[in-house]
Amino acid sequence: MLSEAMRRSRPTARRATFGTVLAACVFGAVSASAQGRLPRQASAPHVEVGLITSQATLTAGRDAWLGVRFQLEPEWHIYWVNPGDSGGPPTVLWEVPPGVTVGDFEWPAPQRIPLGPLVNYGYTGDVVLPFPVRATAAAAGQPVTLTASLRWLVCHDVCVPGRARLALTLPVTEADRGQVDAWNRAVVEARGRVPKPAPSTWKTTARSAGDTFTVVVTLDRAAPSSAVFFPLEVSQVNESAPQQVEASGRQLRLTLRKSDQLSALPRLLKGVLALPDGRAFVIQSPVSVAASSAPGVR
């Protein structure tokens, strides 16, 4: 799954430093009251954030799928694991009892989001980042509280860092039990948009020539007339440059402008290929060099 392809840190502690963002920033923080338990959800500037679960209880030895849900104001966005030209993805630090493990976020396929001269990769609207939780028999036999220290960056014409400490206990409370079916649908829908490994019948090549990469994907069906490539590594592809897409028979050819920050030719070009029917796949290929390329970063 994509969470394996894009693993950035251990599941017990994930932290990130936000990249270059717009100069005008306001800090938005959400913290728990000094009294009482941590909330399951909270409000922050331009976003509601909360923890949801696809099931009411934990079953020993089996993954339960939960999610961090961001409900964004119109025109505001958060970031994918590779944020594009600026920004940084949501991060979380978990506190869990013994016998409980929490896996990495799965990242649904993003969208290209223009922001002035920049293009970012991220999400708008109602966003769920799913993650698995597993418990031993001893842990699953008693209430389990998951505590999340969340950080994110939400942007529109300005960028606003936010943070919150939230908690969810399984089995869920009686008050939340009636929401589990709707939460399950949201988690399932988000997981359905997580890019899958490319079928073994597909063939992908990548070639460097001058200031471009050419990626050719040979499919097991007629190639669609459009597609978008989202690189999994930063500073390889120029995010703000248009992507040239050509389809011929079963072949899809994408011409990608190289990043101005690319200092050495990557050994492997890896990313997400998003198709117009909503499906997305992880593709990768060693990078070959066209014989006519000029010296330097090719």
Image (cartoon, grey):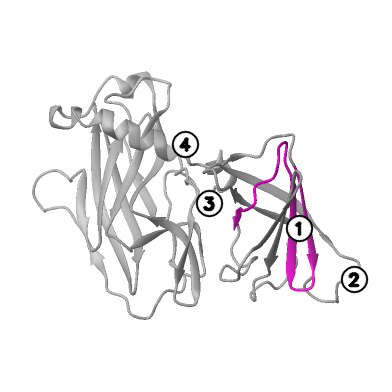
Front position in the image: 132 or 242: 242
Q: Residue at x 26, y 25 (%)?
A: 56
Q: Which residues are magenta?
A: 203-232
User: Label 4 amino acid?
Assistant: Gly
User: Label 3 amino acid?
Assistant: Arg
Residue underneath mark 2: 292
Query: Looking at the image, is mark 1 or mark 3 earlier in the sequence?
Result: 3
User: Label 2 amino acid?
Assistant: Ser
Q: Which mark is residue 192?
A: 4
User: Label 1 amino acid?
Assistant: Arg
Q: CB atoms at circles 1 and 4 under 8 Å apart?
A: no
Q: Residue lying furthest bottom in this view? A: 23
Question: Residue 96's x, y, as percent?
Answer: 32, 38
Q: Residue at x 44, y 63 (%)?
A: 88
Query: Looking at the image, is mark 2 or mark 4 earlier in the sequence?
Result: 4
Q: Quadrant of the N terminus?
A: top right
Query: Looking at the image, is mark 4 or mark 3 earlier in the sequence?
Result: 3
Question: Residue 286's x, y, as percent?
Answer: 77, 53
Residue underneath mark 1: 267
Q: Is residue 37 left or right of residue 143?
A: left
